Amino acid sequence: MPSPTSDLRIRATRPLPAPAVFQHAFPLDEAGALRILRARREIAAIMSGADDRLLVVVGPCSIHDPGAAVEFAQNLRGAAGRHAGELMAVMRVYFEKPRTVTGWKGLINDPDLDGTFHISKGLRLARKLMVEITAAGVPIATEFLDTTIGQYYADLVSWGAIGARTVESQVHRQLASGLSMPVGFKNRTDGNVQVAVDAILSARHPHWFPSLTRNGTPASLGTTGNDDTHLVLRGGSSGPNYSADDVRSAVSLLAGSGLPPHLMVDCSHGNSGKDAERQSAVAADLAARVGAGDRALAAVMIESNLLGGSQDYRAVPLLRGRSVTDACLSWEQTVPLLDRLAAAVGERRMARA
């Protein structure tokens, strides 16, 4: 026998159930499917400019406590109902966290937050939570980081994101071209926006790429292309990029590529200087410009949790409702921002009348 040459650095293998197994265990019912399809259509209409409401993607930086996430969804449902005429509210339900070097990688990768990496358990928890949030009537947003595990829960997602670290990845562009929901591409971590525009254009074209079917079978997937793709400005190492000049520059890049002149601004990350409290000032500035009639600003993202700030994921005990990754605004701090953004949409309508 020849000397082994494969799997030399693989120390263990744990089989995963096929996506269809979890879909059978936690099914999407007809009422939920209709809510998701409607939410996707409404989000696409807002990002194309056909609907003058503001899309607001709001929620925890990452999910580590499903119970607290359900409570947040219930809070958001109430606020969304009050502002349904002005805002389309979608909850951040992020299970995967890209790490610069190391750290907790999210609920799917390490659901027990202890380095045991029970990924099958994480996938089960993730799908179960998404079914519960959908049943509560709240649309779901998530980032697609791993290009295969989306098959476990993509049917429950109303808005998807391709993050700043993967926006240049060809496989993520191919994935987005086949996703069934609107997808936002963030600018690169250094602030480069052209890369995201290129990604949007790529995702609007058909692609073929290897992946998994819902039955867990390796297959080549052919896509139709995703016309519901758009830009997300999130700032970068070069500084924030949510100013009026930055937005005009980004819109110029979009228009130059024949893309709709509408975008989302992420109030966190580089636009807040990684200071969660700064999100309030960023959102207030955006609201003032929306109220003054800016139509390019079609969407806003806010990182919010039941409690503000963050905590180390290894802390014992963990405070319920506080982020274990990036710091977030508290729900109490978030409510007035939603009120102000809704009022700004009303002001924009009056300015056009």
Image (cartoon, rainbow, N blue to C red):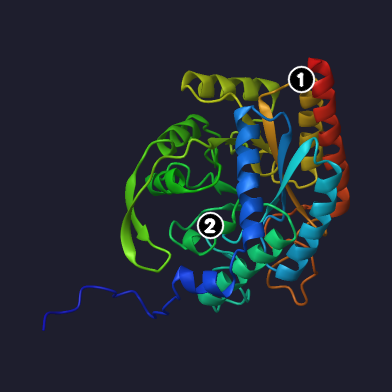
Asked if residue 327 lies left or right of residue 176, the reply is right
Quadrant assignment for the C terminus: top right
- Image: 277 above or below 137: above
Q: Which residue is mark 2?
A: 154
Q: Which residue is mark 1?
A: 293
- Image: 107 above or below 335: below
- Disc 2 residue type (three-letter): Ala
Q: Which residue reaches farthest left?
A: 1
The circle on residue 87 is none
Quadrant assignment for the N terminus: bottom left
Q: Residue at the spot x=54%, y=61% of the render?
A: 153
Q: Residue at the spot x=47%, y=70% of the render?
A: 20
Q: Residue at the spot x=56%, y=42% of the render?
A: 182
Q: Mark 2 touching mark 1, by CB under 8 A?
A: no
Looking at the picture, tell me which residue is in the foreground, 100 or 92. 92
Which comes before the other along the chain, label 2 or label 1?
A: 2
**Badge 2 local density, few (<14 within 10 Å), some, or many (20+)?**
some
